[in-house]
Amino acid sequence: MDALSITGLEKRFVKGRKEVVHALRGIDLRVAPGEIYGVLGPNGSGKSTLVRIVATLLLPDAGEVRVFGHDVVREARAVRELVHRVSTEAAFFKKLSPLENLLYGARLYGIPGRTAAARARELLRRLGLPADRIGKPMEQLSRGQQQKVAIARALLHPPRLLLLDEPTTGLDPRSKREVQGLILDLRARRGVTIFLTTHDMEEAERICDRLAILDEGRIVAEGTPAELKARVGGGEEEPSMEEVFLALTGKEWDDDPAAEA
């Protein structure tokens, strides 16, 4: 059974009175259990819309999405028990500290207090959150530090499918490496399936088993990083992922901060 299967997925949004924006167009993909599958694309390509549908936060206009065999529309409650989602707009109790936020989340999963506290401190340590930030209110933390807390919260009770929507956005290079290492370790130790969206070329190549390149709501290519490079190679030097994107889409890589579709 696939960890995630998507067939003919379509999603449209209406802007104003008449303009229709096609966020996703005929998406088909399969993710195997224990796989790290990445969706690579610039801001506005539809990555976050795709994750929100898998997480049952948006309804598709057409097509089918299943998580370990459960339909995200008809069996939304069952799907929510199998997935966690981490995004750049994670919500917290801003007056509480990172540790207090994690302990509150642990109670929802029935994790005993001492176990939760030890696990929370270890996760925050591995993610590189400074020790003097653990007891400070969330509102005093930087965006990057808050993102680390969001990731730690999702890993307190590892799901079967972890949805990471640009998890390292706003992090410095060292912090990115710490998060990426934890993702790889989570798959190795727990067998968690990870569905990752990113516009970070290096990140996609480093940690993903397979990639889909998403452009204007369509998957224009899919394969391992090596397979994608081989499709556009042929020269003396191996192409970069930026060159792969250019060859497969006909566009320069655009990484501006425009809102994600």
Image: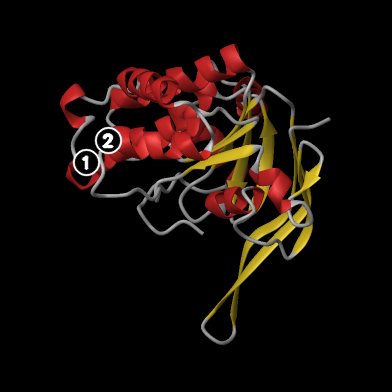
Disc 2: which residue: 145
Residue at image coords 35%, 48%: 92
* Quadrant of image for the N terminus: top right
| Three-letter code for the amino acid on which mark 2 is drawn | Gln
Residue 153: quadrant of the picture: top left
Q: Position of residue 238 (x, y in %)?
A: 53, 19
Above or below residue 67? Residue 113 is above
Residue designated by label 1: 142
Q: Position of residue 128 (x, y in %)?
A: 28, 22
Q: Is residue 247 left or right of residue 178?
A: right
Residue shown at the point (19%, 31%) measured from the top left: 133
Q: Nearer the viewer, residue 72 or 13?
A: 72
Question: Residue at the bottom extreme?
Answer: 17
> Camera-side residue: 217 or 54?
54
Q: What's the CA distance linking mark 2 and mark 1? A: 5 Å
Question: Quadrant of residue 181 in the image?
Answer: top left
User: What residue is shown at x 53% (from left), y 29% (from top)?
Assistant: 157
User: Can see residue 184?
Assistant: yes
Direction from residue 34 to residue 256 in the image, left or right: left
Query: Contact (CB < 8 A) between labels 2 and 1?
Result: yes
Q: Is residue 239 visible?
A: no
